[in-house]
Image (cartoon, rainbow, N blue to C red):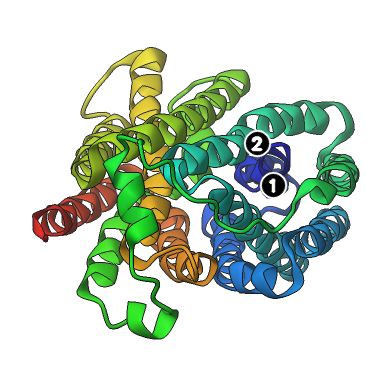
Amino acid sequence: VALMLMFGLIYAWSVFVLPLEREFGWNREQTSLTFAITMLFFSIGVVFGGALSDRKGPRFVCFIAGILTACGLLAASFTDSLTQLYLSYGLVCGLAIGIAYNCVISAVVRWFPDHSGAVSGVLMMGFGFGGLLLGFGANRLIETFGWRDAFRILGGLTFIVIVVFSSLLRPYKTPPVNAASSNTEATKITDAHDQDWRHVLKKPQFWWLWLWYVPLLSGGLATVGHVVPLAVEKGFSGDQAAYALGLFSILNGIGRVGFGFLSDRFGKRILLVDSILMVAAMLLIALIAGDFMQGGFFGFLFCVTMAGLAFGGALPQASVAVASLFGLKHFGTNFGLISSCLAVGSLLGPYLGGLLRATTSSYSFSFLFLAGLAGVGLIAGIKIVGEK
């Protein structure tokens, strides 16, 4: 959890948007592309992280990924052009954090196969809370020292945490599940026929799951990538905007744990709850952004809360679905395959959202599009639940 908390700094990007735009005169489309690139390479890192961990061991892979993250943050502090920012924060940090993310999850889920949903949720809660703690921390660092020193301090902190905690990761053989356990979803996971990526890509269940997952990631990533500038545009203060980002991170973490437990208990039906929540969140944010609905700061926070819960809830459910459908033997690689949704979600969410904002001068169209996309995900979820 400590490792995942540190790697959650990827969600703190939003607090750097306005300082960079003020200094260099960049527009929202250009800065939004930074986060899109970060999530693109994050998803690439997730795809390969599990396989690397299986081959080289989680401790070594996580340590190297942590060092690369610290180097990427240090390089970002010397940014003088968009290309430098895209390469340092986008490519290096995104790729390294993605590798470490899958490395940690693949190792720890195997320690607790009879509670994979809850364990995934707790780990991902740590990842989500990184946006809260490091978002607030980065905001204070920017105000006190400037954005360059903020990147450097975060890089140093990352290095220290990774050196200390990556040594605790060990590859474990999957222990037997307690035969007396009443957790039927867990039993399905351990009884599942292990399938490698070649078989998985031929399964219709994989593609329905993929179509369900993309809209939830798109909506969540768009919110975390734009919540601060959106709040400022609606007339809220910088502290209020940072508070909204922090609340998103808190509910993101709560959603991961809560939906993880629920998916262990109730199975695939919880997929539909998640999709409905995201549809409602995106629609309400669109109405607020377009001044079609007034609710003040608390109304804005309510919408952010819904988006955080829905986004957080999608992550452990994807982990449980991959384990239950395709087994644990090749979990790292298969989890990486479904995590390719992050690449698509980062383009449809934060980047396209920023592009529509730059084109229309309003976030309303961005979130209306995301609401429709979440509706498509709901249909895919219905298909998954209906299959035997």
Are circles 1 and 2 on residues that touch, CB within 8 Å?
A: yes
Residue at the (55%, 71%) spot, across then down: 47
The single residue placed furthest to the left in the displayed view is: 386
Is residue 70 at all visible to an observer of this figure? Answer: yes
The answer to which quarter of the image holds residue 153 is top right
* Secondary structure under the numbered disc 2 in the rendered image: helix
Specify whether 279 is left or right of 231: left
Q: Indicate left or right for 10 with 69 as reference.
A: left
Q: Residue at x 69, y 47 (%)?
A: 7
Going 25% across and 43% down the picture, which residue do you hit? 267
Query: To which residue does mark 2 refer?
Result: 130
Give amino acid for label 1: Phe
| Quadrant of the image occupied by residue 115 | top left
In the picture, which quadrant includes the C terminus?
bottom left
Question: Closer to the camera, 359 or 248?
Answer: 248
Q: Quarter of the image containing the N terminus? A: top right
Badge 2 crowding class, 10 Å Cα cut-off, few under 14, some 14 to 19, many 20 or more, is: many
Residue closest to the eye, 140 or 361: 140
**For marks 1 and 2 on the same chain, the one whose residue lies earlier in the sequence:** 1
- The amino acid type of the residue labelled 2 equals Gly
Q: Residues within 10 Å of mark 1 (few under 14, many from 20)?
A: many
User: Residue 38: percent from the left, percent from the top?
Assistant: 61, 61
Residue 39: percent from the left, percent from the top? 56, 60
Residue at the farthest bottom position:
198
What numbered label is drawn on residue 7? 1
Residue 166 is labelled as none
Front residue (pair 41, 301): 41
Task: Indicate left or right for 381 with 123 as reference.
Answer: left
Pick whichever, 363 or 159, lies toward us.
159
Mark 1 and mark 2: Cα distance apart in space: 7 Å
Q: Is residue 239 above or below residue 340?
A: above
- The x, y position of residue 22, in whole percent, is 70, 44
